[in-house]
Amino acid sequence: MASTKYIFVTGGVTSSLGKGIISASLAKLIQARGYSVTIQKFDPYINIDPGTLNPYEHGECYVTDDGAETDLDLGHYERFLNIPTSQANNVTTGRIYYNVITKERQGEFLGKTVQVVPHITDEIKKSFYKLGETGEYDFVITEIGGCVGDIESLPFVEAVRQARFELGPNNFVSIHLTLVPYLAAAGELKTKPTQHSVKQLLEAGIQPDILVCRSEMPLPNDIRKKLALFCNVPMNSVIEAKDAETIYDVPLLMRKEKLDERVLSKLKISHKKEPIIDNWKGFLGKLKNPTNDVKIALVGKYVELKDAYKSIAESFIHAGAANECKVHLTWIQSEEIDETNVDKLLGEMNGVLVAPGFGERGIEGKITAVKYVRENKIPFFGICLGMQCASIEFARNVLGLEDACSTEIDTESPNPVIDMMEDQKNITAMGGTMRLGAYTCELAKGSKAYSAYNHSKIQERHRHRYEFNNKYLEQFEKAGMIASGKNPDTNLVEIIELKDHPWFVGTQYHPELKSTVLNPHPLFVKFIKAAMDQKKQKVND
């Protein structure tokens, strides 16, 4: 291709319509035709990134290999496309303004008055084009966060309008995702919200090329015709996006609606070659036709908002399909677990995952859960804080160090088996200051971790300030808990596991951030296999 093609996805009527899933599905279909594609997300909030946001506020913070703390939609992009994203794939209003103000302080604008137009919009466009200018991608899909009409989205929408002018019609496509609600009382689908949303887009100077209409009902031809007429788009560019059983159905539904064909036609690209999506269909076949099922408890402190653990939930879907097993997730608030109810909550489970998190709240419940699964030989998987809780529990109840704790919880602990990393002790700034991104880990041969990965050296993503205190490692290993993975440069304990347990593994890193549809994470795959074995053993007993 002569130059990179740019596709912009905006949303209207309401947020959370699924711009990220539509963008990822379109990207998957274009990738399946042999093109190289990437997706980027522009968020209209003023935080530099989501790193300092409470998970209840924004869902999970997704971390990339290069250590960027990003929006959870980047997780969808990676899971669908099976390629890594980076800092360049997620830009916020905060970052844009930060860059412009830094330039102003350095005198780069030669004394000019710095304004939203052109300085802020120029910085946004620079970020739009950054990935395309690398020469790595045939297509760059840009998702604009928020809704058309929001005050905070205006500079982004204006930058998209300017980009259309700069790129020309053969290099630019505008897709608008909107809602066509069904009013049960009237028994009708209503087009007016979409008409108003498109009108707002037109007022901003952008004519959408394609409308993608979210609805719980199929869009009949008369509705499509009406939308086409009043929104100035061809009828075959009104795309139905009916509620799907699973997000992984959406690429096939968009293929059926010919979304990818409409995009390629708009860009004047010949599309005789069909997308090759056999692997995707194979995954869906296994996902929808399981031969087994298991019950897994996810013990965490943010369980009221499922998006707080989005990557973990999706990793279970990938690993379940790999094992042809349906994973029934039970979300358990760690604050509600204690010695009196732990058996009732976890006794019927085939596996327990103790989730990551920060701070003191819910810690004792997590430790109680770990003790229960360790003593009752239930498969256990601890991630980040979950691994640290497993270390504290072992120190207290096996090594007899009753006052063992993490200095995150008790700064005066006489037995800090988890302590702040040395290079973190003098850091006071928040945001982007933790141990972040991909680091190397060397695995001990003969360990459960090694048998899962089948490699002696791996790279996994981190997001933490505290680590296992190596002063206690010899005591732990003598008592049967081994460090089966270590960072070769710092000797940081990355993985712990119990020898005399069917599956008891904790990781300091976040394996869920690397699980994709076509490459389910090996630790999740083995954990589900262990849960299936546990269920089988229970039946036999």
Image (cartoon, grey):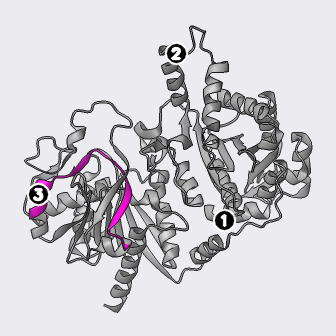
Label disc, if present, on residue 249 of the rendered structure:
1
SS state under label 2: helix
Residue at the farthest bottom position: 540
Magenta-tinted stretch: 454-474
Of labels 2 and 1, earlier in sequence is 2
Label disc, if present, on residue 104 of the rendered structure:
2
Of labels 3 and 2, earlier in sequence is 2
Q: Amino acid at mark 2?
A: Glu
Label disc, if present, on residue 80 of the rendered structure:
none
- 279 or 335: nearer the viewer: 279
- 424 or 223: nearer the viewer: 424
Q: Looking at the image, do the residues carrying marks 3 and 2 touch, with CB atoms under 8 Å apart?
A: no
- 445 or 237: nearer the viewer: 445
**Residue 363 x %, y %:** 26, 52
Residue at point 79%, 66% (across, down):
273
Marks 3 and 1, how far apart at CA: 48 Å
- 457 or 225: nearer the viewer: 457
Of labels 3 and 1, earlier in sequence is 1
Label disc, if present, on residue 472 of the rendered structure:
3
- 60 shown above or below 480: above
Is 169 displayed left or right of 13 in the figure? right
